[in-house]
Image (spheres, coloured by chain):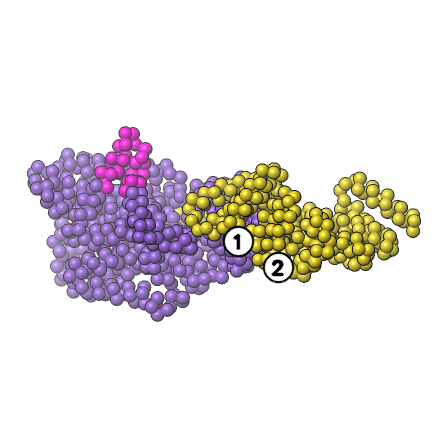
Chain colours: A purple, B yellow
Amino acid sequence: MVLYYERHATVHIMSKSSRKNKTIPAEAAPPATAPTYGIGSVRFTLQAWVRIIIALQMMFLAKQFQPELCTNGDNAVYYILGKSIAEGEGYRDIHVAGSPKHRSFPVVFPAFLSLTAGISKTPLPAKIAVGILGALVILCCYRLFRDRLGSEFTLAFVVIIAASWLLAEYQVILMAEIPFLLLTLLAILARRKSYDKPDDKRWFWVAGTAAVLPVHCHSIGVAFSAAWVVDCLLSRRYKYAMVHVALVALTVVGPGILGAADTGPDIPSKGAFAAPFIKNVYDPEMGTLTLKGVGMRMLGNIRTHFLLLLPKAFQPYFTMWPLNVGQVLAHLTLGLVFLGLLRALFSRYRIVALYVVLYAGILAVWPIASERRIVNIFPFLALFAVDGLGALVRLFDCRRPHPFFAILRTPGGGEAAPLTAQRKVLVWGFVAILALPNLWCRLTMPPTGTVRGSDWANFYSCADWIRMNTPPDAVVLNRKQELFYLRSKRQGCMYPYTHDVDKIVDFLREKGVTHVVYDNFGWTRTTAKYLYPVIASHPDHFRVLYALKGPDTFVLEFVDR
Amino acid sequence: MKAGVLSRDAWFYPLLLAAWGAFLLVRHANYEYFGTPLEPVPFTRVAGGGLADTRVARESIKELHESFAIEKNEVERGHIHHNIGTAYYDLYRQSNQRSFLDSARVYFERSLDRVTTVARLYYNLGRVYTELRDHARAKACYELALGIDPRHILALHNLGLLNHFELGRSDTAADYLRRALAIRPHMPICNFVLGDIALARKEYRTAATYFTREIETYHRYRQSPKGLPVSASTTSYALTMSHRRLAVLFSTKLVNKGLAQRHLHAYLSLERDPEKKNRIMEEMKRYWVVQ
């Protein structure tokens, strides 16, 4: 049975366009009858396949989904900021003693989360909302890049990003990565619409506004803003560049220049500019790096990204395959990514390539190399990989041979004739090699946020004890103040990283600390390093109120005289 | 299949995502973010004020040693040495092993090679020398601490006790202890020692006043949330002995049978050693028969 899902949709698009008397660009015009894909009699149109893939992806995601916040402190900070906005407290760290203005994360994602705060007192609706945004990311990718890749490769691309363990991981935790990614995609999509409809000024302003949102969602969005301006200048779209610069100046730099930073959100770009030169982001007192230090960090970051993080983003088990096959496959994929990136630089999707290059530049000097940063560009990397594969396949097509040096301009899937059966097997084999380990990883990996050792259980138990046994205005010193606040409903602070115990005692007095949680986390030993000497050298200042074993965890009262 | 409502993305995706969200909301409808605290373990603080057993101190020492690799600042390195010394001293108080005390001394001395402006560092080395019964060095360390911070209450306190119990200089001891009480009137054991000094000078009323203050201070601060800067055993010793001294004083020099009986009963309820109890009973019977 042959299924044609899209006939009416096509007619609708055509009639809508003709009603407005607009010319549809040749490459965007859908054929009168959409081609179908599949095996045997099970055939669907591309759009139907995408729906099926997204529906399946959401099913997988429902299995992975856990209502708890994961143990990463940042997701708690985002949630708390959303709560603060929803409760009318402003953009404040209400979990910190004194509720100071927040100075680190841009405002867009917390503002979005504030919309969910009224639904429930738990983070559940906020987490569901982020999961939904993740599905929209896949949909946007499909809409944005189908012209570039053509139907066959678009399907492969959608399968790869829908199967990705990395994107799925960040869809089920409360991080700004997925919303940021969606905003970058929406901005590029809006700009393309605006280019396609030059007479429609609404799209121009929609694109201009959308382009400013990423930098307000994630500090690293400065890379996107820079790519936007450079691409607009190279394309001689000066108005787009000027409007973007003006809007960024108005919304980002303006408050800082006017001295309004104390009353408004922090300058989002500050973190992105300052962080690369700070020795230790968790201990700013350590000062800034020398030029040699920056160079060493760059080398280290490049090595970490190319040998570990990027291969792992595509192949979660790349080190576990026999005979290093996983490593070879992962690095072949990276080779395709590089090829696709070069090709994109010469295409109408140059902004994506520029963005990824600038983003990689920031990653090279970023103090912490983490898979988290790759989420923001993963769909683009997958796009490059598929596009690179498409170019290679076309290059060796005996029906239409191309000179090797023309590989950068070899037509992509969208511009070329259908693939032969053998090449289809090659492409789908590549997709299977990428997608199956990712799906396996998603099926077998413990759901995010549930992997908690007894150290976390004891820590949260202390928070529960504090909530039930201390006055509401108690101030609690602890290692994870954001997560602790949500559970204990008590404001807190984190000890400074100094070996001078008197400085820490002065800090406790200054913050009005009433209780201290002595944790025994397995992932960090800072409490043993910095807090234990304080307790041991000032025994009269601390009194144990609540103690747990395995590992030893305490709630102590801070007795100041 | 004929194209229907679901054939358009504008309908399909909102419906799909809404259904997904609703499914998760229903599935986790009973989810409660807050929990109930785990059952606490009985906990008695060790003599040195450390936490639990020696594991915590040992882990701290390990972590602090690793800090040397990344810490280049000499002052911070001095503090690391001091903190390792503190952890070793804590281990000594828990296990009573002399080797820990020697390690603590070594690290405290190293810290003073790098940091010379912090009174606490001298005070802690003084404590180690006190334990090692090197009283001359201990005294020098406490005095250096006071040279930096004349109001260092613990240095004043320890100098007072050192002069009284070990060096036999009651006048000097009384001077330090009065200074300590001027800064912190509820400082434990100070009143008791001052009472003993007055007793030696046969100033019985003054002695009785100091012993009574010691007892009052104990009861006042036992109920308050404030911690005590000296160990519980020392504080308890001062309380018990103050009751005993007063029982004897009110039986002999400042005759008041009611007060004598009250302090005797208080002493008997606090004293755990039956031999000491019998001894005081015999002594008391003698006084009361005489009277």
Q: Is residue A370 left or right of residue A204?
A: right
Task: Confirm whether residue A364 shows in the render.
Answer: yes
> Is A313 left, or right, of B115 in this rendering?
left
Q: In terms of depth relative to the viewer, which is nearer, B8 or A195?
A: A195
Q: Are marks 1 and 2 in contact (CB under 8 Å)?
A: no
Q: Quadrant of the C terminus of chain A?
A: bottom right
User: Mark 1 is on which residue type?
Assistant: Thr
Q: Which numbered disc covers residue B151?
A: 2
Task: State the residue at coordinates (86%, 54%).
Answer: B253
Q: Work out whether residue A59 can be spotted.
A: no
| Front-most of residues B19 and A279 | A279
Q: Amino acid at mark 2?
A: Arg
Name the subunit of mark 2.
B
Parent chain of label 1: B
The residue indicated by pointer 1 is B116
How far across and down, in percent of the image, does residue B126 sit?
61, 49
Q: Residue furthest top?
A: A323
Which picture quadrant has residue B145? bottom right
Q: In this picture, which residue range is highlighted in magenta?
A: A306-334
Image quarter (top left, top right, bottom left or bottom right) of the N terminus of chain A:
top left
Which residue appears at 39% of the width and 55% of the height?
A287
A483 horizontally vs A255: left or right? right
Question: Does the stretch in magenta take in A273?
Answer: no
Magenta portion: prevailing SS class: helix
Judged left or right of residue B215, residue A29 is left
Query: At 81% across and 48% down in the image, what residue appears?
Result: B265
Disc 1 or disc 2, which is closer to the eye? 1
> Whole-percent x and y of residue A425?
18, 35
Give whichever of A45, A307 is nearer the camera.
A307
Q: Is residue A308 magenta?
A: yes
